[in-house]
Image: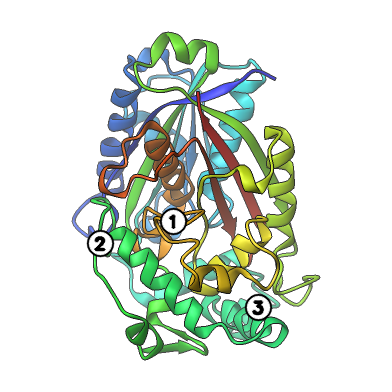
Amino acid sequence: MRSVSVVGIGETKFGRFRETSMKDLILEAGTKAIADAGMEKEHIEALFVSNFSGQPFCGQGHMGPLVSEALSLGSIPALRVEGACASGSLAFRQALIAVASGMYDVVLVGGVEKMTHQSTESVTAGIAGASDIELDAGLGATFPSIFAMIANRYFHEYGNVRHEMALCAVQNHDNALLNPDAQLRKGITVEQVENGLPIAYPFTIFDCSLVSDGAAFVVLAATDVARTISRKPIIEVIGCGQAGDTLSLASKRSLTTFDATVNAAKQAYTMAGIRPSDIDFAEVHDCFTITQIINIEDLGFFEKGKGALAVSEGKTAAKGTIPINVSGGLKAKGHPIGATGLSQIYEVVTQLRGDGGARQVRDAEIGLTHNIGGAAATCVVSIFKRR
């Protein structure tokens, strides 16, 4: 397969934009990515679109042509990809395969979600579609309660890490303060997290990711083509893995190890020819604070059961040994579902280019993105390197 690189990135701010249409979000982020790539639209040969809830939340299906028309891309093939909260990374992976195979030289990948105009009840019901409707959601288990059960099982197996979970939230909010695109640029304290509005024990509202509107786009090109296009540092995709697990919670082998993450990461590391210790920083899927702790263990950054200790020792902080979610993560940057995985890639590419500004990771050469869907039923792990 051919080497593939990222040549353009663009995103909107994440937040609550009730008066902004889905097309507006698409147009802003897509135009930014194409301009960042320094190319004409005519060079784009295919479009991959990520979206989870366009039809139930906005009444809009058939997303591929919608995005193509909004960006005036003509008659190129356009395809929508859906994988719950992993939709963005799945679309990216499909685009990666298409370019690596030689089918196309240059493709555009975009993700968008518009959610905040809906009521909390409607959003909760919509997102529940990412779980098993019969065995989980149909019995009243929302995602906060599902991941709360995971947290309690983690407490049983490895000890109570409530304090360290709160530290994850605090660190991510601190990081978001330095990200102009973040939805919640607001510092919080451990005490606020632990004493916040109860959601599902042990979670309070500060343990949960956000309901967000936003869009993110990425331009991918064969690396030899990228060198002729890009005037910016070449960011090569050196590894990418995808794996799955059962949809229902009761059928999982373990609640405290996400098998989809472990297997997707193994694929990505093998493809890249590196080890977890070679990763300089990562954007991981912190839909809830316990998830961040489990993720950094499953990705091989820390031993199982030792992730919380690493957080408390500052190893995952912005200036730690392996900074996690310097963007603010889903917790503070935001979680517009279809855009989330691509937004993670936006941050990694920004860092590898050295364009992180006040949040720049020192000596960043290799970055990783980790994106899960549902209760870790789908996972994509991608690894990027500055050339």
Vertical placement of residue 323 versus 33, above or below: below
Q: Secondary structure at mark 2?
A: loop
| Residue 136: mark | 3
Quarter of the image where one finds residue 99: top right
Vertical placement of residue 246 versus 190, above or below: above
Q: Is residue 139 left or right of residue 115?
A: right
Q: Amino acid at mark 2?
A: Arg
Q: How many marks?
A: 3
Q: Which residue is located at x 48 percent, y 67 percent?
A: 126
Query: In the image as oriented, which residue stretches furthest toward the top?
Result: 228
Q: Secondary structure at mark 3?
A: loop
Question: Is any part of residue 316 visible from this angle?
Answer: yes
Q: Position of residue 129 (x, y in %)?
A: 57, 66
> The N terminus lies in which quarter of the figure?
top right
Q: Amino acid at mark 1?
A: Asn
Q: Is residue 320 left or right of residue 91?
A: left
Q: Earlier in the sequence, mark 1 or mark 3?
A: 3
Q: Secondary structure at mark 1?
A: loop
Q: Earlier in the sequence, mark 2 or mark 3?
A: 2
Q: Amino acid at mark 3?
A: Asp
Q: Which residue is located at x 51 percent, y 69 percent?
A: 311
Which residue in the protein does label 1 denote? 325
Query: In the image as oriented, which residue stretches furthest toward the left?
Result: 19
Which residue in the protein does label 2 denote? 16
Q: Residues within 10 Å of mark 2 (few under 14, many from 20)?
A: some
User: Foreground mark, 1 or 2?
Assistant: 1
Closer-to-camera residue (314/30) = 314
Q: Which residue is located at x 25 percent, y 42 percent?
A: 24
Q: Earlier in the sequence, mark 1 or mark 2?
A: 2
Q: Which residue is located at x 35 percent, y 64 percent?
A: 332
